[in-house]
Amino acid sequence: MVRVTIWNENSHERRDERVAAIYPKGIHGAIASGIAQDGYSIRTATMNEPEHGLTDDVLRDTDVLIWWGHCDHEEVDDAIVDKIYARVLQGMGLIALHSSHYSKIFRKLMGTSCLLNWRVADEKERLWVVNPAHPIAQGVDRYFELEQEEMYGEFFDIPDPDELVFLSWFQGGEVFRSGCTFRRGQGKIFYFRPGHETYPTFHHPTVLRIISNGVRWAAPEPELKPISNFPGPAPALEPITNEHKKR
Protein backbone atom coordinates (compact mmCIF):
# COMPACT_ATOMS: atom_id res chain seq x y z
CA MET A 1 0.00 0.00 0.00
CA VAL A 2 1.36 3.41 -1.00
CA ARG A 3 1.83 5.68 2.03
CA VAL A 4 0.80 9.26 1.23
CA THR A 5 1.34 12.38 3.32
CA ILE A 6 -0.65 15.46 2.24
CA TRP A 7 0.96 18.68 3.48
CA ASN A 8 -0.84 22.02 3.48
CA GLU A 9 -0.06 25.41 5.01
CA ASN A 10 -3.66 25.51 6.22
CA SER A 11 -3.30 29.29 6.46
CA HIS A 12 -5.88 30.62 4.00
CA GLU A 13 -8.55 28.35 5.47
CA ARG A 14 -7.94 29.83 8.93
CA ARG A 15 -7.72 33.46 7.79
CA ASP A 16 -10.28 33.76 4.98
CA GLU A 17 -13.94 32.83 5.42
CA ARG A 18 -14.36 32.39 1.65
CA VAL A 19 -11.67 29.70 1.59
CA ALA A 20 -12.99 28.06 4.75
CA ALA A 21 -16.43 27.79 3.14
CA ILE A 22 -14.97 25.98 0.11
CA TYR A 23 -12.59 23.80 2.15
CA PRO A 24 -14.10 23.34 5.63
CA LYS A 25 -11.65 20.49 6.30
CA GLY A 26 -8.77 22.30 4.63
CA ILE A 27 -7.29 21.78 1.20
CA HIS A 28 -5.45 18.79 2.63
CA GLY A 29 -8.74 17.33 3.84
CA ALA A 30 -10.38 17.76 0.44
CA ILE A 31 -7.52 16.01 -1.33
CA ALA A 32 -7.46 13.22 1.26
CA SER A 33 -11.20 12.62 0.83
CA GLY A 34 -10.92 12.82 -2.94
CA ILE A 35 -8.28 10.11 -3.31
CA ALA A 36 -9.22 7.92 -0.32
CA GLN A 37 -11.14 5.44 -2.46
CA ASP A 38 -7.96 4.53 -4.33
CA GLY A 39 -6.58 2.47 -1.47
CA TYR A 40 -3.73 4.59 -0.16
CA SER A 41 -2.60 4.89 3.44
CA ILE A 42 -3.13 8.63 3.96
CA ARG A 43 -2.03 11.06 6.65
CA THR A 44 -2.10 14.85 6.62
CA ALA A 45 0.26 17.45 8.03
CA THR A 46 0.10 21.24 8.34
CA MET A 47 2.37 24.18 8.96
CA ASN A 48 1.34 24.86 12.57
CA GLU A 49 2.15 21.36 13.86
CA PRO A 50 5.51 20.65 15.55
CA GLU A 51 8.14 20.28 12.81
CA HIS A 52 5.33 21.22 10.38
CA GLY A 53 3.96 17.72 10.94
CA LEU A 54 6.95 16.29 9.05
CA THR A 55 8.98 14.54 11.71
CA ASP A 56 11.70 12.06 10.85
CA ASP A 57 9.28 9.21 11.52
CA VAL A 58 6.60 10.71 9.25
CA LEU A 59 9.03 11.30 6.40
CA ARG A 60 10.53 7.84 6.81
CA ASP A 61 7.02 6.36 6.50
CA THR A 62 6.03 8.44 3.46
CA ASP A 63 6.22 7.08 -0.08
CA VAL A 64 4.70 10.16 -1.74
CA LEU A 65 4.46 13.67 -0.30
CA ILE A 66 1.78 15.99 -1.72
CA TRP A 67 2.56 19.68 -1.08
CA TRP A 68 0.32 22.76 -1.20
CA GLY A 69 1.75 26.09 -0.08
CA HIS A 70 1.29 29.75 -0.95
CA CYS A 71 1.53 32.66 1.49
CA ASP A 72 3.92 31.12 4.04
CA HIS A 73 6.68 29.67 1.87
CA GLU A 74 9.41 31.50 3.76
CA GLU A 75 8.07 30.30 7.11
CA VAL A 76 8.93 26.68 6.31
CA ASP A 77 11.94 25.58 8.34
CA ASP A 78 15.06 25.09 6.22
CA ALA A 79 15.99 22.00 8.25
CA ILE A 80 12.68 20.36 7.29
CA VAL A 81 13.27 21.30 3.63
CA ASP A 82 16.69 19.66 3.76
CA LYS A 83 15.16 16.45 5.16
CA ILE A 84 12.49 16.37 2.43
CA TYR A 85 15.16 16.98 -0.20
CA ALA A 86 17.20 14.05 1.11
CA ARG A 87 14.14 11.79 1.10
CA VAL A 88 13.32 12.70 -2.51
CA LEU A 89 16.86 11.81 -3.57
CA GLN A 90 16.42 8.48 -1.78
CA GLY A 91 13.19 7.70 -3.66
CA MET A 92 10.25 9.46 -2.02
CA GLY A 93 7.89 10.95 -4.59
CA LEU A 94 6.82 14.61 -4.46
CA ILE A 95 3.70 16.18 -5.97
CA ALA A 96 3.85 19.99 -5.92
CA LEU A 97 0.47 21.66 -6.45
CA HIS A 98 -0.31 25.12 -7.80
CA SER A 99 1.62 27.86 -5.96
CA SER A 100 3.96 25.24 -4.54
CA HIS A 101 6.03 26.09 -7.62
CA TYR A 102 7.59 28.72 -5.35
CA SER A 103 7.96 26.55 -2.25
CA LYS A 104 11.43 26.17 -0.81
CA ILE A 105 11.51 22.45 -1.56
CA PHE A 106 10.48 22.81 -5.21
CA ARG A 107 12.97 25.61 -5.85
CA LYS A 108 15.71 23.59 -4.17
CA LEU A 109 14.96 20.55 -6.33
CA MET A 110 14.70 22.59 -9.55
CA GLY A 111 17.73 24.83 -8.95
CA THR A 112 16.04 27.78 -10.69
CA SER A 113 13.91 30.75 -9.64
CA CYS A 114 10.62 28.99 -10.62
CA LEU A 115 9.11 32.42 -11.34
CA LEU A 116 6.16 32.82 -13.71
CA ASN A 117 3.51 35.29 -14.87
CA TRP A 118 0.13 35.27 -13.13
CA ARG A 119 -3.11 37.07 -12.44
CA VAL A 120 -6.32 36.27 -10.56
CA ALA A 121 -8.89 36.85 -13.29
CA ASP A 122 -11.72 34.34 -12.71
CA GLU A 123 -10.98 32.92 -16.14
CA LYS A 124 -11.69 29.55 -17.67
CA GLU A 125 -8.72 27.21 -17.83
CA ARG A 126 -8.59 24.44 -20.41
CA LEU A 127 -6.02 21.74 -19.70
CA TRP A 128 -4.93 19.76 -22.72
CA VAL A 129 -3.45 16.28 -22.45
CA VAL A 130 -0.27 16.46 -24.53
CA ASN A 131 1.07 13.04 -23.49
CA PRO A 132 -1.95 10.69 -23.48
CA ALA A 133 0.19 7.59 -23.01
CA HIS A 134 1.62 8.84 -19.72
CA PRO A 135 0.35 7.04 -16.57
CA ILE A 136 -0.59 10.37 -14.98
CA ALA A 137 -3.03 11.02 -17.85
CA GLN A 138 -4.76 7.65 -17.48
CA GLY A 139 -8.54 8.01 -17.62
CA VAL A 140 -8.42 11.70 -18.62
CA ASP A 141 -10.08 12.91 -21.84
CA ARG A 142 -8.11 14.89 -24.40
CA TYR A 143 -8.85 18.03 -22.38
CA PHE A 144 -10.92 19.20 -19.41
CA GLU A 145 -11.97 22.64 -18.22
CA LEU A 146 -12.08 24.55 -14.95
CA GLU A 147 -14.64 27.34 -15.14
CA GLN A 148 -12.68 29.67 -12.85
CA GLU A 149 -9.00 29.60 -11.99
CA GLU A 150 -6.01 31.83 -11.42
CA MET A 151 -3.97 32.38 -14.56
CA TYR A 152 -0.38 31.18 -14.71
CA GLY A 153 1.50 32.06 -17.90
CA GLU A 154 4.87 31.53 -19.46
CA PHE A 155 7.71 32.08 -19.09
CA PHE A 156 7.92 29.54 -16.27
CA ASP A 157 11.53 29.43 -15.06
CA ILE A 158 12.03 25.72 -14.50
CA PRO A 159 14.46 23.24 -16.06
CA ASP A 160 13.14 21.49 -19.14
CA PRO A 161 10.74 18.86 -17.78
CA ASP A 162 11.58 15.21 -18.29
CA GLU A 163 8.00 14.84 -19.52
CA LEU A 164 5.24 17.33 -20.27
CA VAL A 165 1.82 15.81 -19.59
CA PHE A 166 -0.59 18.78 -19.53
CA LEU A 167 -0.62 22.19 -21.20
CA SER A 168 -3.02 24.92 -20.05
CA TRP A 169 -4.78 27.58 -22.10
CA PHE A 170 -6.56 30.56 -20.54
CA GLN A 171 -9.20 32.92 -21.89
CA GLY A 172 -6.67 35.75 -21.96
CA GLY A 173 -4.67 33.74 -24.50
CA GLU A 174 -1.84 32.62 -22.22
CA VAL A 175 -0.51 29.08 -22.18
CA PHE A 176 1.37 27.29 -19.42
CA ARG A 177 3.23 24.01 -18.88
CA SER A 178 0.80 22.81 -16.24
CA GLY A 179 1.76 19.16 -15.76
CA CYS A 180 5.50 18.48 -15.64
CA THR A 181 7.58 15.58 -14.35
CA PHE A 182 11.16 15.51 -13.13
CA ARG A 183 13.53 13.00 -11.57
CA ARG A 184 16.05 13.85 -8.90
CA GLY A 185 18.20 11.03 -7.57
CA GLN A 186 15.81 8.10 -7.19
CA GLY A 187 12.80 10.32 -6.58
CA LYS A 188 10.03 11.32 -8.99
CA ILE A 189 8.47 14.79 -8.96
CA PHE A 190 5.17 15.90 -10.52
CA TYR A 191 4.23 19.57 -10.70
CA PHE A 192 0.51 20.16 -11.33
CA ARG A 193 -0.70 23.74 -11.81
CA PRO A 194 -4.42 24.05 -10.83
CA GLY A 195 -5.53 24.76 -7.27
CA HIS A 196 -5.98 28.42 -6.32
CA GLU A 197 -7.47 28.54 -2.84
CA THR A 198 -10.57 30.64 -3.65
CA TYR A 199 -11.89 28.12 -6.20
CA PRO A 200 -13.25 24.59 -5.59
CA THR A 201 -10.57 23.03 -7.79
CA PHE A 202 -9.74 20.24 -5.34
CA HIS A 203 -13.33 19.04 -5.47
CA HIS A 204 -13.12 18.55 -9.25
CA PRO A 205 -13.13 14.80 -10.07
CA THR A 206 -10.62 15.05 -12.92
CA VAL A 207 -8.18 17.07 -10.82
CA LEU A 208 -8.43 14.46 -8.08
CA ARG A 209 -7.99 11.65 -10.61
CA ILE A 210 -4.80 13.26 -11.88
CA ILE A 211 -3.43 13.71 -8.36
CA SER A 212 -4.17 10.06 -7.62
CA ASN A 213 -2.53 8.99 -10.87
CA GLY A 214 0.44 11.12 -9.88
CA VAL A 215 0.70 9.33 -6.55
CA ARG A 216 0.86 5.94 -8.27
CA TRP A 217 3.44 7.21 -10.75
CA ALA A 218 5.64 8.90 -8.13
CA ALA A 219 5.65 6.02 -5.64
CA PRO A 220 9.11 4.51 -5.16
CA GLU A 221 10.19 1.66 -7.37
CA PRO A 222 10.23 -1.39 -5.07
CA GLU A 223 13.29 -2.93 -6.68
CA LEU A 224 15.46 0.15 -6.05
CA LYS A 225 17.60 0.24 -2.93
CA PRO A 226 17.83 3.61 -1.17
CA ILE A 227 20.93 5.66 -1.92
CA SER A 228 21.69 6.07 1.76
CA ASN A 229 20.07 5.48 5.11
CA PHE A 230 17.76 8.28 6.23
CA PRO A 231 18.34 10.65 7.97
CA GLY A 232 22.13 10.34 7.70
CA PRO A 233 24.13 13.14 6.07
CA ALA A 234 24.59 13.21 2.32
CA PRO A 235 27.98 11.94 1.13
CA ALA A 236 30.65 14.62 0.71
CA LEU A 237 31.47 15.66 -2.83
CA GLU A 238 34.94 14.92 -4.11
CA PRO A 239 36.90 18.19 -4.02
CA ILE A 240 37.83 19.76 -7.33
CA THR A 241 41.61 19.70 -7.83
CA ASN A 242 43.89 20.86 -10.58
CA GLU A 243 43.98 17.26 -11.80
CA HIS A 244 40.19 17.32 -12.30
CA LYS A 245 40.39 20.61 -14.15
CA LYS A 246 42.73 19.09 -16.75
CA ARG A 247 40.19 16.43 -17.73
Image (spheres, grey):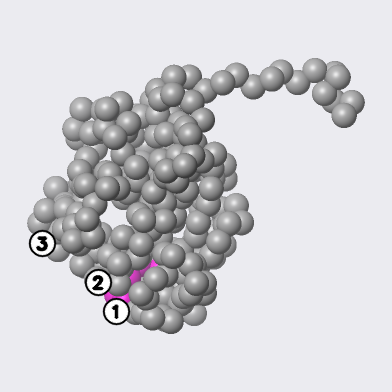
Residue type beneath disc 3: Ala
Instruction: Bin the neighbour count of mark 3 within 10 Å (Cα to Cα): few under 14, some 14-19, many 20 and up.
Output: few
Where disc 3 sits, the SS reads helix
User: Which label's residue is closer to the chain start, 2 or 3?
Assistant: 3
Residue at mark 3: 21
Percent position of residue 225, x then y: 48, 34
User: Which label's residue is closer to the chain start, 2 or 1?
Assistant: 1
- The residue nearer to you, when weighing 181 against 172, is 181
Residue at mark 1: 147
Q: Residue furthest front?
A: 223
Q: Main secondary structure of the magenta part?
A: strand
Distance from label 2 to label 3 (Cα)? Answer: 19 Å
Q: Which residues are magenta?
A: 146-151
Rendered residue at 34%/79% (across/down): 145
- The residue nearer to you, when weighing 20 against 45, is 45
Percent position of residue 62, x then y: 31, 39
Q: Visible in this render: residue 73?
A: yes
Identify whether 104 is placed above or below 97.
above
